Amino acid sequence: MTTLITGATGLIGRRLLENLADTRVLSRDPSRAAKTLGAGIDAREWAGGDAPLNPEVLDGVDAVIHLAGEPIAASRWNPAQKERIRASRVEGTRALVSAMAARETRPRVLVCASAIGYYGDRGDEELSEDKPPGEGFLSDVCVAWEEVANEARALGVRVVTLRIGVVLSMEGGALSEMMLPFKMGVGGKLGHGRQWMPWVHLDDVVGLIEHALTHEPLDGPMNAVAPGVVTNADFTRALGRAIRRPTALFVPRFALRAALGELSELLLNSHRVVPTVAQQTGYSFRFPEINAALTNCVRPAGES
């Protein structure tokens, strides 16, 4: 299977390339991507966003994994940044589907990243894939993102939209950024800590993508979260145990909102998301529970 990957230099993309044999990547700077990802990488140019994509890059491609997008937490959400976030996902996916439409022979499957932000702030409601979207900026972006990806289905392409939770890895992402304050003993829960915080180990994100590629009956949304969903307070205690540091402090909600503005939604909204489709279609999680997942991430191999 020849697989085309966008966003290959990101946290998930880099790990995917270690697992997939025959790959092609799209990048704004192919030469830089090839240096970053290693010798032998077939890197092709694409500016992303609403830039057109040459349909020839899909020649011989059996599957597309679309991960590219402006980082959600790169800066405060002013109107310009929110438009960059939206366009990089919605218009980027539109360009990819348009390139598929221009070809007679098309990929068999498109696995398109989405996010748990699809559901909005839902308190304690359990959220499987059949639940409707929520409200707010992230929900609106995810709905539009998935709608465009699903247009590929009319072209005969199987489409899986992966609603990804907080990815746990020391190679990048949220966990690596929060380690310093926790190691200094000043880490703690965010706000009241009762908000649900869906997480997933990086190994399982990659496993779920591979599951989506190869499990042909799978078509539609799939929550990429571990079954052992926890609250922010539970996560905080588990991380403290894993690195053997106290976690008695907390950051008030008003302080997060004052510091981050609307971006604080990422930390304070509650998403009790469950991986119903993944489990019903036979995926077996390597790290279903938070304690083992965090220990694997933060402790060197062999350390007890």
Image: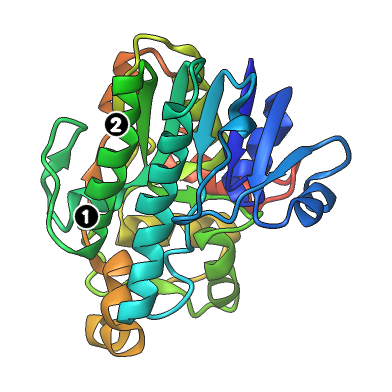
Instruction: State the quadrant of the C terminus.
Output: top right
Residue most extreme to the right? 39
Left or right position of 219 against 188: left
Left or right position of 129 against 67: left
Q: Nearer the viewer, residue 137 or 238?
A: 137
- Is residue 232 positioned above or below 199 on the image? below
Callout 2–callout 1 Cβ contact below 8 Å: no
Q: Position of residue 51 (x, y in %)?
A: 50, 54
User: Identity of the amino acid at label 2?
Assistant: Glu
Whether residue 75 is visible here, answered yes or no, is: yes
The crowding category of the residue bearing disc 2, from other C-alpha atoms within 10 Å (few below 14, some 14 to 19, many at least 20), is: some
Query: Gap between marks 2 and 1, in whole Å?
Result: 19 Å
Residue at numbered disc 2: 151
Disc 1 on helix, strand or loop? helix
- Is residue 210 positioned above or below 84 on the image? above
Q: Nearer the viewer, residue 101 or 213?
A: 101
Nearest to viewer (mark 2 / mark 1): 2
Residue 37 - label: none
Disc 2 on helix, strand or loop? helix
Residue 139 - label: 1
Left or right position of 1 against 93: right
Q: Position of residue 271 (x, y in %)?
A: 23, 51
Whether residue 77 is visible here, answered yes or no, is: no
User: Identity of the amino acid at label 1?
Assistant: Ser
Q: How is the image coloured?
A: rainbow
**What residue is at 39 percent from the left and 64 percent from the top?**
85
Q: Position of residue 250 (x, y in %)?
A: 34, 78
Left or right position of 92 against 256: right
Q: Earlier in the sequence, mark 2 or mark 1?
A: 1
Q: Nearer the viewer, residue 40 or 184?
A: 40
- Is residue 107 positioned above or below 167 on the image? above
- Is residue 301 positioned above or below 204 on the image? below
